[in-house]
Amino acid sequence: MKRLSFWGSGMNSMRLYALLIASIILLTAMSTIAIVTADAAYPTLQYDAQRTGNVSGVAPETATLLWQSGEKTAGCIQAGPIVYDGKVYLTTWWSSGMGVEGNAVNALYCLDANTGEEIWSNTAVYGASTAALADNKLFVGTHRGNLACVNVTSGALLWSKKIEENPSWYGVGSSPLVFDDRVYVLTFSDGTLHAFSFDGTELWNFSTGGEIFCYASPSAYGDKIFFAGKDSDSEQHALYCLDLNTHEVIWNFTTETEIRGSPTIWDGEEMVFFTTKYVYGKARKLYAVNITTGAEVWNVTHYSSWASPALSNGKIYIGGSAVDTTFYCYNAEDGTLIWKNEEMGGAIGGAMDSSPVVADGKVYFGTSEVDGTVYGLDANNGSILWSYTLHIPENFGGGFNVASPPAVADRTLFIGVDNVGVLAFRDFKFLDFDTDTPEKPYPSISGIHYGNITPAHDVYVTSLFTRACEGTGGHTEYVKIWNDTWNGVEGRWRGYTGNWHTIPFDDAFMLTEGETYYYHIDTGSYPQIHHDKSVLDVSDGTMTCTNFTDANGRIYNDWIPAIRLE
């Protein structure tokens, strides 16, 4: 990890500094971490085809930094991360000379979700588009004006099709939508919706003709797709609703200024929500429109940023621009204000260009300003639960803007930061898996233990402690822990020096709640043993003996060593 002197937090700085340094010391030793659940995924911008940003599962309660990606990723980041099968994918652009080290490289990156280490990168594919994942493929817009398809495993380019003839500064900044085995993406210079098959064939397109917001992206539900457009003749901005079967316009809803971000769909109440650009003297709104008729349901005045609204539990969440650095929560049915938080205004005022994500009763986003901040708010009342500010170093020419839409998967928040890279936040439970002192530790004898462990909670492990019988030198000489999909980690005794009851593992690792792991433990002298226990249940989980061979060659299946993994 790098640039530790450049970050700060909304928490007490010294306390958080100590916590994060401790975490970093542990995490930099890691080369292997336990397998995460296979369904921990965040496959597209704002999580789903309706662009709700509403995610199930656990999300971080604190600003505990799990990792920060390397200097190569420290370019301009306006794409959001997506997550699948323990990997994070994200594009960077305009990277030349960026980052504190100045070594950032334009690319599509694949990072390990648990360590942040680069797995692969593709320097031919880069830009501001958030990728979409389906069928072992990544679909992403590029700075050069192409829609690209990349193999998710290897990073190899499968195909690339030029769709933006006037890429300008932005290229294809629209984030592709995968829906019903089709890929949909917008080109900003002509307000055109393109539909592709997974093999790269353009099946059809619909052009509104005029220039639209460079990062506008489509959303879909049922047989309808929704996207921003602008009539080239009348110069009229509008939200378009197309029939996916006939490719004909069902309705369009006209607005005074351009439509920002992506439309957000509430399928249960048949409404679509979107914002329009702030232009002085013109209507700037957050709109709710009926998805069947195109009739307005409600609107409120809103100074919009680039962000799209998030929708969760009948509430709309959206932040403002630098003109109004306020974060809002509205009743999605009628637009009445539920709460607002005005504490995000910096010295200059940072726009909330980062589209919010709601998970586990919390709402997450970042601020786009020189000292960018990542926020976690209580989704029910708007109070700040935690914040993480990235303070630029003295005389540094760039800013740590946070415009990247965040992603939440496998208990972790991922978000990109200009000149920094990707940050991952995850709460750790530093708890013991402790088999405690046996009621009857004797008879005691050294030997070789085999069995398995199923923890009742996540355990971050750096060492093994062995309980010795009183007055003896009982200890563990060798330990290995592994499972069917993970080669595991070993630890070895260092003799009767220092804290000789404890041996360190070669690498720190995580044992995941409910997963079963195997152990091989070789003990010496007289360690404490749980007798007549083929299965030992403790508050922290279950430990099972499959075989214990003592120093005399006798074999047991109900002797369990009294250890603590910590």
Image (cartoon, rainbow, N blue to C red):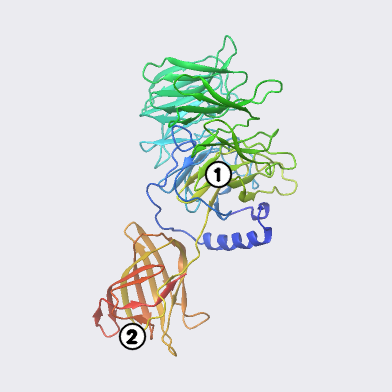
Q: Amino acid at mark 1?
A: Val
Q: Which residue is mark 2?
A: 445
Indicate which disc residue 434 carries. Answer: none
Callout 2 amino acid: Ile
Viewer-side residue, 56 vs 509: 56
Work out whether 463 lies above or below 313. below
- Mark 2 secondary-structure assignment: loop
- The residue identified by callout 1 is 363
Picture residue at 38% right of the left edge, 46% below the top: 39
Asked if disc 2 and disc 1 are in contact, CB closer than 8 Å, the reply is no
In the foreground, 419 or 261: 261
State the image coordinates of residue 360 (x, y, percent, origin top left).
Answer: 49, 48
Q: Residue at x 60, y 31 (%)?
A: 306
Q: Please provide percent x and percent y for residue 294.
A: 49, 19
**Which of the 4 quarters of the picture holds residue 149?**
top left
Who comes first in sequence, dot 2 or dot 1?
1
User: Regarding mark 1 in the picture, which secondary structure is present there?
Assistant: strand
Label 2 and label 1: CA atoms lie apart by 55 Å
- Around disc 1, counting alpha carbons within 10 Å, would you say few (fewer than 14), some (14 to 19), or many (20 or more)? many
Name the image quarter holding residue 531.
bottom left
